[in-house]
Image (cartoon, helix red, strand yellow):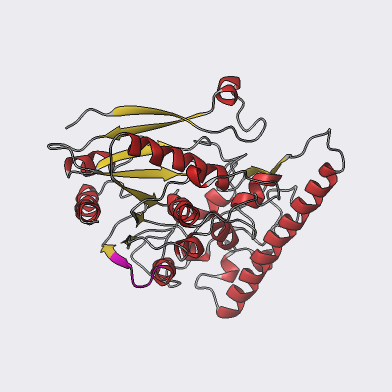
Amino acid sequence: MTELKLAVIDVKPGAAMESQSGLAMLRPRIFGAWREAAGPKMRVAAIVLHPTSNFMGHYLIEPLAARGVACMGLNSRYVNNDTMLLMERVIQDLGAGVKFLRSQGYERVVLIGNSGGASVASFYQAQAERLTCTHFAHGEPTAFVPEDFPPVDGIALCGAHEGRARLLLRWIDPSVLDESDPVSADPALDLYDPANGPPFGAAFLARFTAAQRARRDRIEAWVDGRLRLLARNPAGPQDQAFVVYRTHAEPRCVDLSIDANDRPPGSIWGDARSVNYAANAMGRFTSLKAFLSQWSSRSQADGPDNLARTSVPVLLFTYTADASTFPSTRDAWLAAAAGRIRNVDVKGGNHYLSGQPARVEQVADELAAWARAL
């Protein structure tokens, strides 16, 4: 096996105080761990990146290198903390990673969009093919240039979410009565009240889904109002932090008959109700600007919408026992890249392929063969 290498990559500065580290603000960098291909050096490399998760130990790095494809697990500047995360900065970081691999002599580069990285990969390549992201979701100019986004040659999607904004819309708990009270609940909309199911009837699900959108829209309207208020004093703060309680009320985690696959009941993090009420969970801590970029209806990082704007080949891996991506998720990706996408079912694969080495080997075999043939 080739040596695991560390990549230290300078990136462009972002927002004021996006990190508490003075060193990081003075010289912003991102970090990656990568292996070159075993045997004769090939000219194809892959990057696997997530908006916030540390992918430097990703399960595909070693298997792909062993199969002739160099692979880097790359972190964004927001690793392990999405409070200030701007999706637009994440794709800029990804561009720095692509440039790094090109500088190492790799002629073909593919992006592996695993989990929440799927929407990042799609957003990136859409901008690489046609730069349209002139402003952040909160309205400030991005100052992006085409050189920030060298195009790649293909995209592989594994256990792929459609994007953070869609995720929050489908996970946010509509039973919250008071945004300042993490335990307030309207029993008529409480997913975890046995009186409502499971199984859940069509009428309950319709009310529940409408109430989810209404809560998301209320938060979004409040965010807009706060930003307008702050903007009245240019010398004052232009952003603020806040908490969004109870962001894991996904009916499909409780009722396995909805969008059925091979998943067990519950969340990928354990008991779904416990995750919903936890002190930390998806989208729990955020700033105004980060909320608009990641979680709002104005997010520019929707996965399928961006994938439809690309032209490269796409390989989709559907993990059939995933408790957070579903048959409808697969169908959305397939529709977005119709005519240039191939789906591979990984039977019994859970979201992380945790404890499933044979399935990791299956994904690595298929992905390496596809990448080498581009």
Horizontal and vertical percent position of residue 236? 83, 34
Q: Answer above or below: position of 329 versus 70.
A: below
Relative to residue 344, is residue 265 drawn left or right?
A: right
Residue 341: say if magenta.
Answer: yes
For the residue pair 202 and 184, the one nearer the viewer reads as 202
Q: Quadrant of residue 336?
A: bottom left
- Residue drawn 21% across the image and 40% down it: 65
Quadrant the C terminus occupies: bottom left
For the residue pair 305 and 62, the one nearer the viewer reads as 305
Q: Quadrant of residue 40?
A: top left
- Residue drawn 20% across the image and 50% down it: 361
Quadrant the N terminus occupies: top left
Horizontal and vertical percent position of residue 293? 62, 50
Horizontal and vertical percent position of residue 153? 33, 53
For the residue pair 234 and 345, the one nearer the viewer reads as 234
Residue 71: say if magenta.
Answer: no
In the rendered image, the residue lying farthest to the top is: 23
Q: Answer above or below: position of 47 versus 56.
A: below
Relative to residue 103, is residue 285 drawn left or right?
A: right
For the residue pair 92 and 249, the one nearer the viewer reads as 92
Q: Is residue 245 visible?
A: no
